[in-house]
């Protein structure tokens, strides 16, 4: 491991108002899009801290390292958001699989997107059947631009990802993922960011969520019955 410095827990337990907050620490291999996206959603008593890459080191092992240097409590959840676009070619695959094993060993959950996180963003606007043939990150971004009129991953626009569309994206991504072979390393386009959203809304009380996200939570609990 490199000499990264230990980072303090983003919430202080000394603050009584924050003592019972659920914390999700999410490290990603992207500098811009995931952090901006999750910052759009200010939830009560559920905090999402996204740790972007800022040093150009975006391989999966480095993402895991940056995540593990954060101090955390046992009840906090640690997640990695990873794109497969960089990792599943040639000799990179073996290292990628080893990192996924290390993540499990440290109780870190992983939400992969193939080819990229932008596929999750795109599913806010199109059905899952429209993305199955997208082969790489460039194609996904081109489709986003076609749908939105513009796309700049360094300047996401909140109005493009309203809470009401999270529920739509969730079920589109879930349906898409159910049909994709390959297991831990999917063989074609999919995104598992819906798994992170499932964890987030499941940990919140209904009264702590906006109506649109409360509807997603209710759908998940209804599906269990």
Image (cartoon, grey):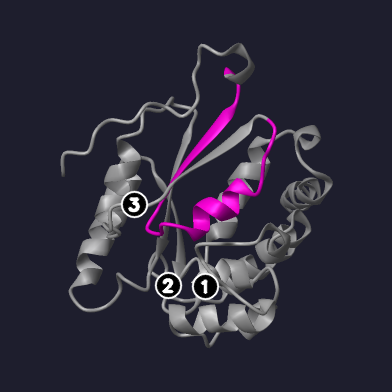
- Location of mark 1 (residue): 190
Give the CA distance from mark 3 to mark 2: 27 Å
Res 129 quadrant in image: bottom right
- Which tag, 3 or 2, sits closer to the chain's start? 3
Q: Residue at x 21, y 63 (%)?
A: 95
Q: Quadrant of the N terminus?
A: top left
- Location of mark 3 (residue): 54
- Magenta residues span 19-44
Q: Secondary structure at mark 1?
A: strand
Label 1: how many Cα within 10 Å (few below 14, some 14–19, many 20+): many
Q: Secondary structure at mark 2?
A: loop
Q: Residue at x 52, y 72 (%)?
A: 190
Q: Residue at x 64, y 36 (%)?
A: 203
- Location of mark 2 (residue): 186
Res 16 quadrant in image: top right
Q: Residue at x 54, y 83 (%)?
A: 142
Q: Marks 2 and 1: CB-CB under 8 Å? A: yes
Q: Is residue 11 above or below residue 118?
A: above
Camera-side residue: 196 or 220? 196
């Amino acid at each position: 491991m490199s000499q990264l410095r230990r980072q303090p827990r983003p919430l202080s337990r000394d603050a009584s108002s924050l003592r019972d907050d659920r914390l999700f620490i999410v490290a990603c291999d992207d500098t811009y899009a995931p952090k901006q996206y999750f910052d759009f959603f200010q939830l009560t008593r559920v905090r999402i801290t996204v740790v972007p890459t800022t040093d150009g080191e975006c391989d999966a092992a480095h993402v895991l390292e940056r995540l593990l240097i954060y101090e955390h409590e046992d009840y906090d959840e640690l997640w990695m958001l990873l794109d497969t676009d960089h990792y599943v070619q040639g000799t990179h695959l073996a290292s990628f699989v080893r990192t996924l094993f290390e993540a499990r060993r440290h109780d870190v959950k992983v939400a992969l997107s193939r080819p990229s996180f932008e596929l999750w963003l795109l599913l806010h606007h199109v059905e899952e059947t429209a993305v199955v043939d997208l082969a790489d990150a460039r194609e996904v971004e081109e489709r986003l631009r076609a749908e939105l009129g513009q796309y700049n991953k360094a300047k996401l626009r909140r109005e493009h990802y309203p809470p009401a569309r999270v529920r739509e994206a969730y079920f589109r991504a879930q349906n898409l993922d159910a049909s994709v072979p390959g297991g831990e390393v999917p063989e074609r386009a999919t995104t598992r960011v819906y798994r992170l959203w499932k964890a987030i809304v499941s940990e919140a009380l209904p009264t702590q969520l906006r109506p649109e996200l409360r509807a997603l939570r209710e759908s998940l609990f209804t599906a269990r019955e």
